[in-house]
Image (tube, rainbow, N blue to C red):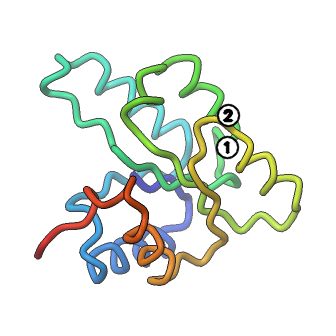
Amino acid sequence: MCIDDDSMVQMLSEIIFSDQKFCKEIVKAPDGFAALQYFEEQSKLDSKDQLIPKLVFLDISIPISDGWDFLEKITTNFPDIQTQSKIIVLSSAIHPEEVEMANAHPLVYKYISKPLEPKHILELKLDPDFSGFFTAN
């Protein structure tokens, strides 16, 4: 899942994911509210039918419900996400405090500064926690 209000960031991410053979499908959300709605819809399905993203790229500075709000609500309303998904903050935050807060959050696996680049995906490829995200084709 890519949660970002910038359609160019979403498009660039999709191209990089495809080029690097990283993941098969991307769920896009323009803000935290839309992403939370997606998780709400999925939670209503039988567990065998749920399509819970295993990885979420989250921008902090998004409208309606920002990244911090998303993290708070996902923790409170969807505790299962903690075992089913990894969250990577992909943000252009310039304040070191925001980077520290993101890295300290228990749901955040990693912080990546925008723009997303192929080298970031290559780093994930070397991480054993992400080997299942890469496709053979």
What amino acid is found at the position of numbered circle 1 in the picture? Asp
Given residues 102 and 131, the one toward you in this image is 131
- Dot 1 falls on a residue whose secondary structure is loop
Q: Quadrant of the C terminus?
A: bottom left
When asked about the image quadrant of residue 106, the answer is top right
What residue do we see at 42% from left, 72% from top?
13
- What crowding class fits label 2: few (fewer than 14 Cα within 10 Å), some (14-19), or many (20 or more)? some
What amino acid is found at the position of numbered circle 2 in the picture? Asp
Above or below residue 22? Residue 25 is above
What residue do we see at 32% from left, 20% from top?
43
When asked about the image quadrant of residue 6, the answer is bottom right
What residue do we see at 41% from left, 22% from top?
80
Q: Which mark is residue 66?
A: 1
Residue receiving disc 2: 69
- The image shows residue 131 at horizontal and vertical percentages of 30, 61
Residue 118 shown left or right of residue 33 in the figure: left
Mark 1 and mark 2 in contact? Answer it, CB < 8 Å.
yes
Above or below residue 116? Residue 35 is above
- The image shows residue 36 at horizontal and vertical percentages of 47, 32
Q: CA distance from mark 1 to mark 2?
A: 5 Å
- Dot 2 falls on a residue whose secondary structure is helix
Above or below residue 53? Residue 2 is below
Residue 57 shown left or right of residue 48 in the figure: right
